[in-house]
Amino acid sequence: MCARSVSFRCSCCRSTVVTNRVLFAIGAGAIYLACALPAQAASATHVTSFTVSPTHVVGGSTQRAVASVSVFIDPNESTYFLPTYTSIVVQVRQTTSAPGFYYYQCADYVRIGSTSMTCLLPLPLPVTTSQTITLVAAAGNINYDNGNDPGMTATLTVDPAPAPTGTLKVATNLAAASFTITGPATYTGTGTSFTQLAAPTGTYTITCNPVPGYLTPSPQLRVLTVGGTATFARSYELDLRVRAGTGAGPWDPGTQTTKPGTTPVSATFPLGASFFIQLATSDLTGAVSRFTLSQPAISPPLTESALFGGTVAIEFDAAASADTKYFRAVHLGTELLTITPSDTSLPAVRVMLTVNRPPRLGGTSNEFDSLLIDLAHQRGIPPDLLKGQVAGESGFDPMSYRYEPLSVDLASMSRGVNLRTIVPFVDYRLATADGLPEGSSLVDGDIAPRSRYEIVVDGTRRFIAPDDAFVSALSIYQVNNGRANWSKFSRGRAARIENDPSVLNFTAQTPAASSYGLLQILYRTAVEEMGWPGIVGALNPSYLFDTPPNTAAGGGSLALGSGYLRRIFSKANPNVAVFDPAFRAPSDLTSAFTAAFNKYNSNRTTGTYGLRVVKNASAFTPAPGAPIFP
Amino acid sequence: MVIDRRQLVVLGMALMLGGSPVRSGAQGQQQGDEVLVQQHFPQWLIDESTADVSHGGPRPFRAFAYTAADLNGSGQSDFVVAAYSNGFSGAVVVLSGHGAAAVEIANPQFPQMSGSAPAVKAIDMNHDGRQEIVVSLTSARGVSADWVLQWDGTTLCSIGPTALDTNGNEDTVLNDADFIDFDGDGTLDIVNSMEFDAADATAVDTFQVFKLLNGRFEAERTLNFFETFARIPPATERPSSMRPVKIERSFTIADASAGHLMTVVYEGEPGRQEIRSAEITLNGIVVAAPNIFAQHERVVTMPVALRPTNTLSIDIRGPRGSRMSIGIGPE
């Protein structure tokens, strides 16, 4: 504190009057304006009350304190201006040691008697440390008895002026975040949001602390100005990787990798794809986790019963923890995959799976892909498998056709339960040698397919002509069995024929006792088991060919055949929950479909047919329409 | 007979028959049995269809077939065995008695029994007086799967060749099987059909033979060729004629280097007319001369040498309809 210059002369010297004043003295090294005086009489001039307000000031000389002083002036006081005024000096002085020095003359020329006054005390210069100062107010005639009044005391606490401040703010992306802000002051905080008011101005640096599973953000520097706000924004990035591909596993060269964030990673796979997803650390070491699918959104919605209608992708061995999980996309749409590491210090990662339409199924015979994809989605049958079955059944010939003289015509159409006499088969019947008329709804297109079979007429072997009538099943069987293998596929009935060929002496119902189209659906199966409504009610067998007009109008074999496969799947696999299945491995799903294909074909789960379909399907892998990760 | 279809319109309209919307078995003995069998249509089959149709599946479908059978060797066909289908699932129910007095006594569970167009037949496989049951149901392609069942006193148990899935579910491996006493021991064996796969032209002929051993049919051998040959002369032939009828077949095998056996069964079932003699030529070599048949053995087995592609030629002599079966397979 700087000392203020003041001139005075000791009153006991009764010499020069400098002034009549109330003086305050504040500060270290107090100066006592009054000289030592004798003890004061009761009526002697003296200060009767003294207070300071406020008693606590901040900021040193930038503020003022008000001193309230009451004083009694003795009339007998020998004063310079008696009788009316006395040249009494009321002074305030400091009695405690404090840095700096200060005094103040509160009043001069005080009237005789009692007088109250206030005066504004200048305060010390800015201080760097807090201090409490004792003030003494005293009165006296400088020329006469200055110093007789012992005065009254009051205290004043002076704190240094605060430093200029502003507001610090921190935003992070992680509740588990913690950080330290260093600068003019030091602060620590946690979470996604932090605010520090009244922070001293200056330059601050935030340093984030490590959080397991995340990359620690780098330090950030900000300057805080007076009244301003300095905002730190720090983002923790997951120190994990999501890896995915359609190969055999993460070691496959085609594996794609992305960094997860706090929002779900988007991963897109084509319908039918077999794919894997791995959670790994930044060094690509797998992180054992639980993979949980939720929130399936199948789109477009399923319009009828479907396999696996509770998910867009089947997760294999879902209950087990592993770093890599395998899936099969079975419906179009989206589903959230939450990957929760077994190491609880690592954060969960979310992946939004999107199953979209593959642009094609393999590189060959793609003309039916769009229809197959539609049906695969609706049925829950992987489209490559469906296409593999088409390849096996018809070689992609939409006009594929096969007459079944033993297993259908002999068994149930013309013999057995004699379906040809039952509605609706009666309407699509060829006229028979035993007197049944041609069905009223039969058209030439229903009859024509039989022309691929030969018969012997009058000793001449030739193809069946459109106008041939009463062509017997036996005549077709005898000439074409070597090529069609009917007897090998149907030993029991073949034995009957071999014993007595006359059992086939009936008019071959080549329209109704045959299978049609890409999936070779049997006409009887379409009409009876599948309840085919036909095309505008017309159940003509030829409408089961997979021509564009037929398929557009509700005909064709694909919808019916895939529908049959969907339904028979649960018979081939009675322990599989078809809505939300629990397959342990991808091969289990393949085996389940293999069994279902066998059921479709020969009504037993064993055999080589299903295996051949699966083998065919390997050539029709769904092509990706987009990168797995955007 | 083949005539021109265009000539049939007037004739056909005059003879048109109406169809019945209800399908039922053709093997029932009595009208009462048929009504009873309908009444016992398993509710779970109906429920299954109803549940599926409520989610857009095909409309419900029902079919059944039944046969009377002597399951317990009483000498009477005092059981009715019915097979049911909703188009996809199959079921079997056993009724005791006939008509109004019949009661359901067993509904054996076969979770993988599936298919449509049910058929049931009763066959005494081992000639013990107790008939076994063969239930057949067909696939989407019309191929029938056969279940061979035997009465154990309380229910029908599967004794046919089956395969078990990983959950222990049993499914038949038979498709339209041929039941024939292939080895002449008096018990019918099973010759299974080749697996139906019309598109697989490369498939090698394979027929599996199953034999009843210890109460169950077990795989016994594999045949590359199997066929039953009957002497079917032209219709114009005199009934008393015994002129030989020549039949020719060809077949392929995968491995011609291995040794093969030819088995000739010329009296497969009692009551059949016997082949009097036959000459069998394989790839131009006579492998069975007519004198073999003079030995009156029901089954004759002989080693044969095969080629990848083989031609089998048979001259059959005997009454109309007389027959024999020939099987050729690895030793």
Image (cartoon, rainbow, N blue to C red):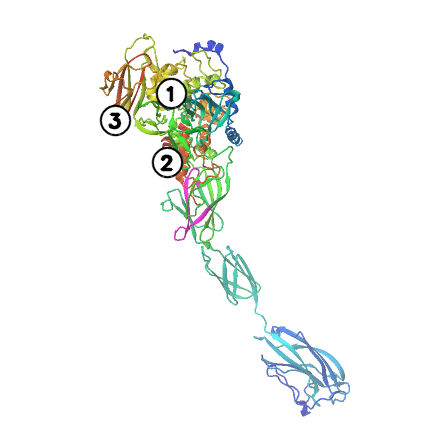
Residue segment shown in magenta: A269-291
From the image, tell me which residue sits under label 3: B260
Is residue A605 or residue A46 the one in the foreground?
A605
User: Label 2 lies in what chain?
Assistant: A
User: Label 3 lies in what chain?
Assistant: B
The numbered mark at residue A618 is 2
Disc number lying in front (2 or 3): 3
Can see residue A286?
yes
Mark 1 is on which residue type? Arg
Identify whether A362 is placed above or below A476: below
Separation of marks 2 and 3 at Cα, in angstroms: 37 Å
Residue drawn 53% across and 64% down? Answer: A224
The question of residue A277 being in magenta is answered with: yes
Q: Is tag 1's residue or tag 2's residue first in the polypeptide sequence?
A: 1
Q: Residues within 10 Å of mark 1 (few under 14, many from 20)?
A: many
Pointer 1 with pointer 2, Cβ within 8 A: no
Which quarter of the rendered picture does the C terminus of chain A lie within? top left
Task: Identify the element where label 3 is drawn.
Answer: strand
Q: Are marks 3 and 1 on the same chain?
A: no
Which quarter of the rendered picture does the N terminus of chain A lie within? bottom right
